[in-house]
Amino acid sequence: MKEIAILGYQQSDSRSDAGAVNEVEMIMPVLERTFAQVGINNAQDVDFVCSGSCDYLQGAAFAFVAGVDALGAVPPIKESHVEMDAAWALHESMLKIRMGHADSALIYGFGKSSPGELPIVLSQQLDPYYLAPLWVDTISLAAMQARMMLDQGLITERDMAEVVSRSRRNAMNNPHAQLSGDVSVDDVLAQDTYVSPLRKGDCCPVSDGASAVVIATVEKAKEWGVPYALISGISHAIETHNMGMRDITDSVSTRIAAERAGMNAGKVDVAQLYAPFSHQEIILTRALGLGDETSINPSGGVLAGNLMMASGLSNIGEVFNRIVSGEAERGIAHATSGPCLQHNLVTVLETAEKA
Amino acid sequence: MSEEEQEMITKVEAPVYLKYNFTAGSAPTRFLAQIKNGVLAGQRCPKCLAVYIPTRGSCGRCGVPTVEEVELSDKATVQSFTIVSIPIPNNPIEPPFIIANVVPDGANVSFIHLMSECVNEDVHIGQRVQAVWKPEDEWGYSMDNIRYFKPLDEPDVPIELIGKLTVTGEEG
């Protein structure tokens, strides 16, 4: 099987409101920087393009098609789309390469969440018979999850505040972060309750932005002569939509995905975990059995800026950045979808130096 | 109650209402600001030089931003058309009427608008037309500042030249 590498990653600033720009105007600058990073002109120079977005976010039917206008798609290109985080678009692109249908791929994700009421918009991803008609919003669902963990003695509010404090401090080194600062645990605990037991700081912000990644076979990466990291494994698993039928204080699907992706075959220097709520980072860390040797969310994670449909892809890019800079040798990137960590994808990345 | 006695459920009502603050985008905003002044403003691709109207912000062929603004003529050429013979719900226009893809002089792509002051059966591809504007005090941020396009007494444009005329109506 051909080894696959990641060669480039760019992200826009995470902004609470991108203002008047439309999807194509949001994507173009990110793609331009990505093309420059790997030394290509446009999407004509890769074999496959796959994007991740969700039309519900900006409330415009077929909004994802507008993204194609950023690619340079004449003459026609091979192109696909997932109505999911673009980390799953990367998964599809890897399958395309493994099947021998492509040697390189561009993946991009974008989300303009500010036009709608995001927690309410996301209620419509719930099961259509029992939950969506109740308009249960994502923050309330996460609050119930946190309440369950607190009552079972699995976490304390201080544990949650520590996650927020670390995110804000880590994000000070992330030029694209939306929320960052020297915020102490006590500062977080001093905040008012928002949706009990969550404080505003426990919840990711609403963000607009885009990110992009280029992957290719190792042969192709060598031909292009740019630094790369190996993608040694990728897998995803999903749990039932019925929240009462799963243990929401754990993330079984994340653990299964990580095992299948081969996470346990070596040390994990860095882990970018998609935790839209502080307590969910603790669930994920425990589900994966990560310890002190692992740097968790050095970018600040999505508590510092949550690009719907792009932040899962960005997590892969953030691990890539740390491997090519020599900061880490091996790491994992996690993406999630659905309420209370329903659907989870784990990617394992490794340095190309040892191979 | 046995299964046979239960009423079959064939429908669950769950209406969805979501509110959005929609924004057109930077390039469409510039286009709309210009049409409020009675100007059809296109944008030119810096690579292939194609002129787009209405603008979306990028050249879909080249994948690059279209920054340069180009003022276009309100004279245009019919690229395609259809005669609508059935009433459309909530449409105040009485059938039969014509909707047409027209390419304004100086642009390389068409947009859809209405045609009137014409004999429907005589409308044809390559026909020259011109915008009939509403009175200036009624202009807003909308394509319906133009009521419709009406025929011009000018020679037809050969099919291969449609979408290739300069802003003065000459061959590009």
Image (cartoon, coloured by chain):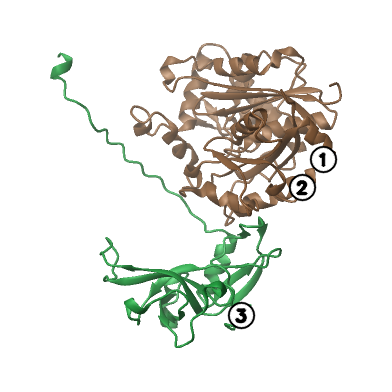
Chain colours: A brown, B green
- A301 or B3, which lies in front? B3
Q: Is residue A218 visible?
A: yes
Q: Secondary structure at mark 3?
A: loop
In which quarter of the view is residue A213 placed?
top right
Check disc 1 and give the amino acid type.
Answer: Trp
Q: Are marks 1 and 2 in contact (CB under 8 Å)?
A: yes
Check disc 2 and give the amino acid type.
Answer: Ile
Circle 3 sits on which residue?
B171
For the residues labelled 3 and 2, the Cα–Cα distance comes to 35 Å
Q: Are marks 1 and 3 in contact (CB under 8 Å)?
A: no
Circle 2 sits on which residue?
A40
In which quarter of the view is residue A99 placed?
top right
- Asked if residue A355 lies left or right of residue A209, the reply is right
Q: Nearer the viewer, mark 3 or mark 2?
A: 3
Q: In the displayed structure, would residue A214 be above or below residue B155? A: above
Circle 1 sits on which residue?
A224
Q: Secondary structure at mark 1?
A: helix
Residue that protrudes farthest toward the left in the picture: B5
Quadrant where the N terminus of chain A is found in the figure: top right
How many dots with numbers?
Answer: 3
- Asked if residue B5 lies left or right of residue A196, the reply is left
Q: In the displayed structure, would residue B130 be above or below residue A260? A: below
